[in-house]
Amino acid sequence: MKKILYFITQAEFGGAQRYVFDLANSLKTDYQVAVAMGEQENNLRLAKILQENNIKYFIITRLKRNISPINDLLAFFEIIKLIKNYRPDIIHLNSSKISILGSIASLFAKPKTIYTVHGWVFNEPLPVWLKYFYLYAEKFTAGLKDKIICVSEYDRQTALKNKIAPTNKLTTIRNGIAPINFYSKEEARKKILLTTFIKGGLLIGSIGNLYKTKGFKYLIKAANILININKILATFIIIGDGSERKNLENLIKKYNLTDNFILAGQINQAAELLPAFAIYVCSSIKEGLPYSIIEAMAAGLPIVSTNVGGIPEMIEHKKTGLLVKPAEARELAEKIKLLIENKALRQKLGTSTQEKVKTEFSLEKMVEATKKIYL
């Protein structure tokens, strides 16, 4: 049985980790699979989920998200040692840091090397020098990879535009999800009410790690426009946690939104609670092909999202959702207001998104396409 060793930089449970778990869990009867991950402080949620599903994993203790020359060098030697000891037929890299270290380390053991791009890191809001560092590092290490999977056509075209890799090395395989056992609207609202207080009006929500790239500060500013300026009764909620929590809490206080804007923290199986939302909002300034939007589509929610990354491949403006420019709180507020005031439009958009998920974003489709790459 062939061995596949998946690598991921962080051990929290975001979109890239979800992708790794879904592949490993779906393919564990066809291949001998294992996952290697960096140590992210005390957040080893991915390790816990892998353990619960009887999937072998390894911790690369020196692998960190941010650039750190000493840690990166030590992590590099850990990766070489792991590849030599585990002797995988294929290593499947996920995220920019591990793609760079892992592809160079693969030279010492010669496994087939596959890399999945979950949104190019040089598109993030980084200092110019760091953007160029990642761009040229991706170009240099692309030659060491046998195949590069992009989760959106946008990312594949970005690679071609920046001459990262030739056409025959790049392929697009969009993320997919298994059917979700959603709670009813009433049950979902009750479960959310157990952990927080909903003041009133429609519940408008988002799910995601509290990082700068998620643009949640613009969602808070949009809420301020709607609630304090337009006097609309609504409650906003974000399910997730992360490094930006304190900054977001301060912004909520600044706009006197404490009673109307909830940071609910991490909730397990949060997607099952989506029917509690009347509107789903994605305010990201950088994305690949976000699972959270696929889940919101499956829940039949009307969606307002920024027009970034692969999102326009999921949401067609005015047909399966409403798209806005990134970092534009006023435009975000306008589109949310339109949906709040137009129930028929909410229902129409929600119905059309459900149909699209079934045909284009299934887990089975994603797994089968990835298996073809392995073969």
Image (cartoon, rainbow, N blue to C red):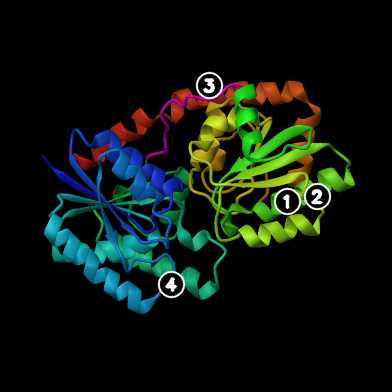
Which numbered tag is attached to residue 355?
Answer: 3
Q: Amino acid at mark 4?
A: Phe
Give the mark nearest the N terminus, 1 or 4: 4
Mark 1 to mark 2 CA distance (whole Å): 6 Å
Magenta stretch containing residue 24, yes or no? no
For mark 2, what is the residue? 224
Give the mark nearest the N terminus, 2 or 3: 2
Mark 4 to mark 2 CA distance (whole Å): 38 Å
Which numbered tag is attached to residue 220?
Answer: 1
Residue 270 location, x and y as percent?
53, 37
Give the mark nearest the N terminus, 1 or 3: 1
108 or 168: nearer the eye? 108
Residue 6 location, x and y as percent?
27, 50
The residue carrying pointer 2 sits among few (fewer than 14), some (14 to 19) or many (20 or more) residues within 10 Å by Cα, namely many
Quadrant in the picture for residue 371: top left
Give the mark nearest the N terminus, 4 or 2: 4
Drawn side of residue 235 relative to residue 112, left or right = right
Drawn side of residue 197 relative to residue 311, left or right = right
Residue occupying the point 10% across, 39% down: 1
Q: Tag 2's secondary structure?
A: helix
Q: Tag 3's secondary structure?
A: helix
Mark 2 to mark 3 CA distance (whole Å): 33 Å
Residue 240 location, x and y as percent?
56, 47
Drawn side of residue 278 relative to residue 138, left or right = right
Residue occupying the point 69% across, 30% down: 278
Please say whether residue 327 is visible from this viewpoint: no
* Mark 1 in CB contact with mark 4 (< 8 angstroms): no
Query: From which residue to which does the magenta span run?
Result: 173-184
